[in-house]
Each structure stands twice: as structure tokens, then as C-alpha cells.
Amino acid sequence: AGLAPGDLAKNLQALLGNGFIRRPEVSVRVKEYRSRPVLVLGEVARPGIFALKGDRALLTILAEAGGLTANAGHELLVARPPEGAESRAIEQFTSMPIVPGLSDVVPISDTEELPPGALPGSDVFRASFRELMKGNPEQNVILEGGDLIFVPRAAQIFITGQAARPATLKYIDGMTVQDALQQAGGISERGSMKRLKVIRFEDGKRRELKVQLTDLLKPGDTLNIGERFF
């Protein structure tokens, strides 16, 4: 107990060499860290507590949790407890109920958000799922015991007015007006491409913006297609 894998290998090598095996060579690889659990919450197939294994990469744990659901956003949060608070973090999330579909981050200040269940003062790392799937090693975080991985629900875009199929769409990073229209089946026979507007709430204020097909949308936007005059 308490030894690093290399130290344990040296001890075993010395013991085996003491009359059992001539010049033994011993290597030790950690299969599973039973005392180093992490918590996965949000839009994953099987939220819950998972023990870290030899491969402690973020993608490995996400795979153990069954992968992301169709409602998952494009960004993940990894909350690491403050230094020295690992055991307190583990105690906290091992005692909390696992609620499937829990998807909302908790605002701590105007600039900081923490996943539910994370200790105040935790360091939060944001990872792009798209970059993870591309194999970006900087995004594939090496996890530590007490880490909390949270997958928020994707933001939404609302299509109203003279669309072929008025709908609520999953927001995708980089989505344009044209992208949203295509998913809504284009405009109806009564719609006008010259009467596109976006209703956007910023700083508590409602704004109406005339937009072009190439304009980028933001999470929570409502794209309205106006009716042509004749």
C-alpha cells in the first residue's frame, strides 16, 4: 500500500531474487485504481461513478459511460477539486444521487460555471467533443481521482414563421442561418428569403436582427421567416 508501481516492482524484484529466482525482472502495471473514482454526469448513456484504470484518459471514461446521448452539447466540462480536497470531493459525489438527464451547469459568477456536485474553487477544463474525436491530445485530459466529468445538454435554435417545418433544433457550433433553414426543410410557399430575422436575447434585452444566409447563429436564437407580400 502507498507505493508507486515502479517502487512496488523493485520490492517484488528484491523479494523474488532472495532465493527464488535468479536475476528476476519485474514490471508492475496498474489495471484499476479502486480508490480513485471519478463521477460522470449529464448527457451520457450511463451516468455514474467509475474507477480509474490504467488508461485514465477522458475518452476512455466517456466510453465506459456509454458515450454521449443525442442531446449532448459540443463541449464537456471536467471539474478538478482544489488541491488537497480530493477525498472531500469523492465523499461528496459518492453520497449524491445520480440523476439521469441532469444537464444544467450551475452559475457561480458572471464568468464561471461549475457542474452540479463540484466543489467550489474547482478548476474547470472545457473540452471540445469535436476536437476529442479528431484525436487532439490536449483535449483528451488525463483524469485524477475526484474529478467530475459533466456533459451539458446542447443549446437550441428555434425556427418560426414561414418555414416548411417550424422546429426546435440542436445548436451546433458554427451553425449558420442557411444550416438552420436546411434542417427546417427550407421556406414555405408563402415565405420570403428577403424577410429573415433573428430574435436574440442579450444582457436581458430582446433584439431583432435582419440576417443573411451566411450569418452565424448563437445558442437560444429564434430564426423567423417572414411572409412574402404577394
Image (cartoon, grey):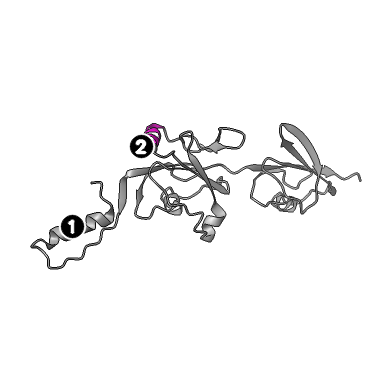
In the picture shown, does residue 109 fall above or below 60? above
Q: Is residue 104 visible?
A: no
Q: Residues within 10 Å of mark 2 (few under 14, many from 20)?
A: few
| SS at circle 2 | helix
Q: For residue 171, which numbered disc appears in the image?
A: none
Three-letter amino acid code of the residue under disc 2: Ser
The residue that mark 2 highlights is: 87
Residue span colored magenta: 88-96
* Residue 43 percent across, percent down from the top left: 51, 43
- State yes or no: residue 147 in magenta: no
Badge 1 vs badge 2, beta-carbon distance below 8 Å: no
Count of numbered marks: 2
Horizontal and vertical percent for residue 36? 34, 44
Residue 27 drawn at (x, y percent): 25, 61
Q: Is residue 18 visible?
A: yes
Residue that extends furthest to the right in the rendered view of this protein: 230
Q: CA gap, disc 1 to disc 2?
A: 29 Å
Pick the residue in front: 150 or 137. Answer: 137
Give the residue number, with chain letter if any, for mark 1: 12
Residue at the image point whose x is 18% and y is 57% from the top: 12
Q: Please determine whether, in this image, residue 53 is positioned above or below residue 25.
A: above
Q: Residues within 10 Å of mark 1 (few under 14, many from 20)?
A: some
Q: Earlier along the polypeptide chain: callout 1 or callout 2?
A: 1
Residue at x 49% of width, y 58% of height: 137
- The amino acid type found where label 1 is placed reads Leu
* Residue 95 percent coordinates (x, y): 37, 32
In the depicted view, which residue is nearer to us: 69 or 204?
A: 204
Q: Nearer the viewer, residue 143 or 192?
A: 143
Identified at 74% across, 53% down, the residue is 178
Relative side of 189 to 61, left or right: right
